Image: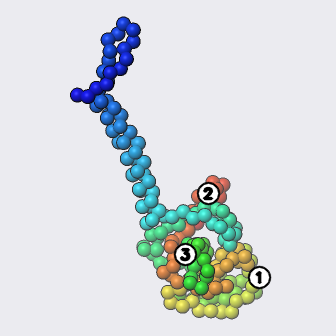
Amino acid sequence: MLSEQLPAAAGEPSREVPARKKRSIFRWMLRDIVIPLAVAFGVAMAFQATIAKPYQIPTGSMIPTINENDRILADRIVYRFRSIQRGDVIVFNPPASVDSNTPFVKRVIGLPGDTVAVESGQVLVNGKPYVVPTAKPTDYLMAQETVPPGQLFVLGDNRDDSYDSHRWGFVPIDNVIGRADVIYWPLPHLTWLG
């Protein structure tokens, strides 16, 4: 057995500390600190990659629903179990016509086959007003368009200050990352969106 000699106090015999005790401290740190932290980190990364992903909102295009610099969680698996619905707030990669690598957050207004127009300050879906209580009024006009198969028409709730489908067209459904479910930061803005 390996041991090391400890200096003795006056009048006491010298004491030996086994090397095994040093190993047990190392095992304790590994078992109770290092491994749990590594597992927690791995679970967090797997959760973010497959289930929910956090995003910070860089613009005011969704005001008053989501403010600039709010942080949201996007549910990445919900659309494996149900289809996208009108009114969902989604996170998506912008279409190829938009020069941006940053995901966007907008509200789904038109589904494949819907007609969408903006007249007299109202968004019309299939000829009827589509009202989102939190959306700001619309000051622009947009001629009626039909949403093609496999595409979505999306608008920001801050209608006039949103870079969205009324400017650049439709979003391929394949570009959808997930549904924005909750604003989690700052805490006073904590809100369920889903």
x 35%, y 20%: residue: 6
Q: Earlier in the sequence, mark 1 or mark 2?
A: 1
The residue singled out by tag 1 in the image is 139
Q: Quadrant of the C terminus?
A: bottom right
CA gap, disc 3 and disc 1: 25 Å
Q: Is residue 30 visible?
A: yes
CA gap, disc 3 and disc 2: 20 Å
Q: Earlier in the sequence, mark 3 or mark 1?
A: 3
x 47%, y 78%: residue: 83
x 28%, y 26%: residue: 3
Residue 69, given in percent of the width and then of the height, sits at: 66, 62
Residue 49, given in percent of the width and then of the height, sits at: 45, 65
Q: Nearer the viewer, mark 3 or mark 1?
A: 3
Q: Nearer the viewer, residue 83 or 63?
A: 63
Question: Residue reaching furthest left?
Answer: 1
Q: Are marks 3 and 1 in contact (CB under 8 Å)?
A: no
Q: Nearer the viewer, mark 1 or mark 2?
A: 2
> Of the numbered discs in the image, which one, if any, rests on residue 82?
none
Q: Is residue 145 above or below residue 82?
A: below
Residue 2, given in percent of the width and then of the height, sits at: 26, 28
Question: Is 182 on the left or on the right of 27, as rendered?
Answer: right
Q: Which residue type carries mark 3? A: Phe
Q: Quadrant of the N terminus?
A: top left
Question: Is 124 on the left or on the right of 79, as rendered?
Answer: right
CA gap, disc 1 and disc 2: 31 Å
Question: Is 15 on the left or on the right of 41, as rendered?
Answer: left
Q: Which residue type carries mark 2? A: Trp
* Disc 1 secondary structure class: loop
* Displayed quadrant of residue 17: top left
The residue singled out by tag 3 in the image is 92
Q: Nearer the viewer, residue 24 or 56?
A: 24
The residue singled out by tag 2 in the image is 185
